[in-house]
Image (cartoon, grey):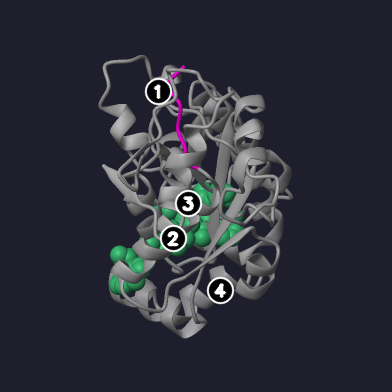
């Protein structure tokens, strides 16, 4: 798949042809189109060899000329991990699905669900607390667990104390062989984890939109949605602390457009095969 470069495509073509960037393995731009990670993924190469990201020193701007290319050369091999966050119902998973068309994305809620399955490490460790509800098959009963956890701060802290370290371990393992990737982390700021990421993207929308979605698509009652949201930072606080804000009150196409712009801004379309 190719990402169109709206304004600076031709510049990119020219810059990459400048002397000094003579590495024949650079595979960047063809006729105003940047070859992105997906295109490179189609190559028959081991994953870690497919693409590298260049971080722009002027974060949030389009790649900046010759100096930018020098930096790309220097940063070759540096891993780039995006933390994708936002309040519940804002559309993180919807954004993750779109982003997953370009780079690998890990969903920590899905990892958590696996940990709570029968025989999962989370189920095993949570079994030390008598209040944790289990199904007959040995899996944690997530809906009852949510009811108990969110009604009692001590229980919530106990569960988080067991599950969060397991989630971070799973994430660290997963990102190891991913030069460019994203991780969907609902409680990124609440857990003080910003430093784990090279850039943070926040999906945001009006609270009423999020609550409507949670009622309509996720089976929440309004009270249930509001209860869980009260344990998360306000959406504006998350947005203020993020590098990229994706506004998701509109259509999924509008969300996709913003994601594509953000991929350009972070230089993720500038790829090299090494
Ligand atoms: C409470 C549990 C059992 C509910 O499971 P369920 O399948 O209903 O929901 P799921 O895990 O898909 O989470 C949905 C959303 O709930 C919110 N949420 C989950 N845990 C928490 C929490 N501890 N505090 C605030 N919000 C939370 C997030 O926005 C998340 O995206 C589960 O979320 C859980 O085990 N939570 C504790 C682990 C955790 O903190 N996960 C988030 C990691 S960043
Ligand atoms: N722009 C949109 N237009 C229509 N539906 C949307 C849009 N964004 C998200 N949705 C839908 O709203 C619901 C909630 O979105 P999503 O699951 O992505 O939120 P989330 O932030 O991941 O929530 P959680 O924290 O619970 O995982 C989903 O059913 C999703 O398909």
Horizontal and vertical percent for residue 144? 44, 57
Residue 9 appears in the picture as rendered: yes
Instruction: Give the Cα distance between marks 1 and 3.
Output: 18 Å
Instruction: Give the Cα distance between marks 1 and 2.
Output: 26 Å
Q: Which residue is mark 1?
A: 50
Residue 144 appears in the picture as rendered: no
Residue extent of the magenta highlight: 268-274
> Could you tell me which secondary element the residue under label 2 belongs to?
loop
Q: Nearer the viewer, residue 208 or 151?
A: 208
Q: Are the residues at dot 4 and dot 1 in contact (C-beta closer than 8 Å)?
A: no
> Could you tell me which secondary element the residue under label 3 belongs to?
helix
- Viewport quadrant of the N terminus: top left
Q: Are the residues at dot 1 and dot 2 in contact (C-beta closer than 8 Å)?
A: no
Of the residues under marks 1 and 2, which one precedes in the sequence?
Answer: 2
Q: Nearer the viewer, mark 2 or mark 3?
A: 2
Q: Nearer the viewer, residue 92 or 169?
A: 92
Q: Nearer the viewer, mark 4 or mark 3?
A: 3
Instruction: Give the Cα distance between marks 2 and 4.
Output: 45 Å
Of the residues under marks 2 and 4, which one precedes in the sequence?
Answer: 2
> Could you tell me which secondary element the residue under label 1 belongs to?
loop
Left or right of 178 on screen, residue 167: right
Q: Which residue is mark 3?
A: 264
From the image, give the main secondary structure of the stretch colored magenta.
loop
Q: Which residue is mark 4?
A: 227
* Residue 22 within the segment the image draws in magenta: no
């Amino acid at each position: 798949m190719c990402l169109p470069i709206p304004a600076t495509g031709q510049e990119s073509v020219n810059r990459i042809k400048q002397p000094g960037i003579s590495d024949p393995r650079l595979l960047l731009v063809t006729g105003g189109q940047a070859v992105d990670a997906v295109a490179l993924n189609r190559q028959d190469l081991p994953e870690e060899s497919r693409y590298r990201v260049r971080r722009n020193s002027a974060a949030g701007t389009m790649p900046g000329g010759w100096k930018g290319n020098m930096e790309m050369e220097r940063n070759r091999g540096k891993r780039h991990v995006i933390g994708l966050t936002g309040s519940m119902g804002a559309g993180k998973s919807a954004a993750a699905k779109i982003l997953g068309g370009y780079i690998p994305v890990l969903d920590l809620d899905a990892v958590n669900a696996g940990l709570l399955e029968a025989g999962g490490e989370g189920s095993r460790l949570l079994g030390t607390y008598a209040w944790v509800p289990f199904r007959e098959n040995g899996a944690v009963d997530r809906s009852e667990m949510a009811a108990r956890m969110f009604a009692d701060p001590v229980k919530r802290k106990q569960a988080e104390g067991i599950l969060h370290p397991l989630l971070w371990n799973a994430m660290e393992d997963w990102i190891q062989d991913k030069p460019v990737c994203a991780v969907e982390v609902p409680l990124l700021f609440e857990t003080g984890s910003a430093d784990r990421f090279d850039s943070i993207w926040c999906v945001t929308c009006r609270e009423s939109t999020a609550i409507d979605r949670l009622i309509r698509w996720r089976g929440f009652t309004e009270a249930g949605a509001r209860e869980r949201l009260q344990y998360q930072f306000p959406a504006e606080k998350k947005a203020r602390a993020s590098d990229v804000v994706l506004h998701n009150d509109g259509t999924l196409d509008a969300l996709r457009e913003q994601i594509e712009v953000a991929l350009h801004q972070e230089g993720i379309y500038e790829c090299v095969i090494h």
